Image (cartoon, rainbow, N blue to C red):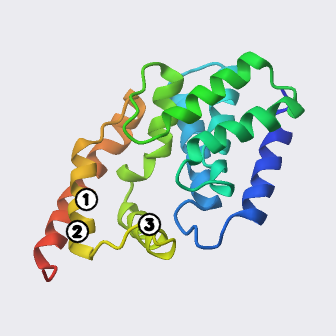
Amino acid sequence: MNFYSAKQYIINRLHSELDPKMVYHDLKHTINVYYAALEYSKLEKISEYSTKLVLTAALYHDSGMLIDYQNHEEASVRICEQELPKFDYSEDDIKTIVRLVRKTKLLEEADCILENIICDADLDYVGREYFFIRSMKLLYEWKLLKKHDYSLVEWLDIQVSFLENHHFYTKSAQSLREDTKRNNIKEIRELYKICPD
């Protein structure tokens, strides 16, 4: 497995080919997910080999945005299946990575440690102080791409509901991010009160 070449390949493609309207699903998001996955892999004490599989999934999980915004998880799977053999990933490696990429689709349930890590890494920002900034970037991206046109009040309502229904899977993420996530809910509720209808 030539992890470092696979990493450089997809970073280069995301850097040069992503639509500039992708202000949320940008290269920075992929890098943030990568580092969150690395942190959780260390804290959960998974093997170096398994860590490379999770990190590859983190790097490729939104690569499908280069092809198909709406169905990007499946487009990401196709990229993994086409490109990773070129970097000496085995068939079993790719099957694992594909499974992990599919688990990043919203409302999917994680049920093993590698899935837990990738899901927590992908939504790590919900337990960060910069949650609101990232959230507004997603709203703006959807407006730019004409996917939705929510008002600020509607968006805040959606975000509170999303945060209240979200849960972290790993003990590491629960320990590191749950308190800040609760604070984010509280802050959005406060902001909601002062927004005009």
Relative depth, front residue between 190 and 63: 63
- On the rendered image, what quadrant is the N terminus found in? top right
The secondary structure type at the circle numbered 1 is: helix
The Cα atoms of the two marked residues, 3 and 2, are separated by: 15 Å
Instruction: Tell me the tag on residue 154.
Output: 2
Relative depth, front residue between 117 and 82: 82
Residue 50's quadrant in the figure?
top right
The secondary structure type at the circle numbered 2 is: helix
Amino acid type, mark 1: Ile
The Cα atoms of the two marked residues, 2 and 1, are separated by: 6 Å
Badge 3: few (under 14), some or many (20 or more) residues near its Cα, within 10 Å? Answer: few
User: In percent of the image, x 69 and y 64: which residue is there?
Assistant: 18
Residue 60's quadrant in the figure?
top right
Closer to us: mark 3 or mark 1? 3
- Is residue 48 at all visible to an observer of this figure? no
User: In percent of the image, x 63 and y 29: which residue is there?
Assistant: 98
Badge 2: few (under 14), some or many (20 or more) residues near its Cα, within 10 Å? Answer: few
Which callout, 3 or 2, points at the residue further toward the start of the chain? Answer: 3
- Please give the residue where the numbered disc 1 appears in the rendered image: 158
The secondary structure type at the circle numbered 3 is: loop
User: In percent of the image, x 72 and y 16: which residue is there?
Assistant: 92
- Please give the residue where the numbered disc 3 appears in the rendered image: 147
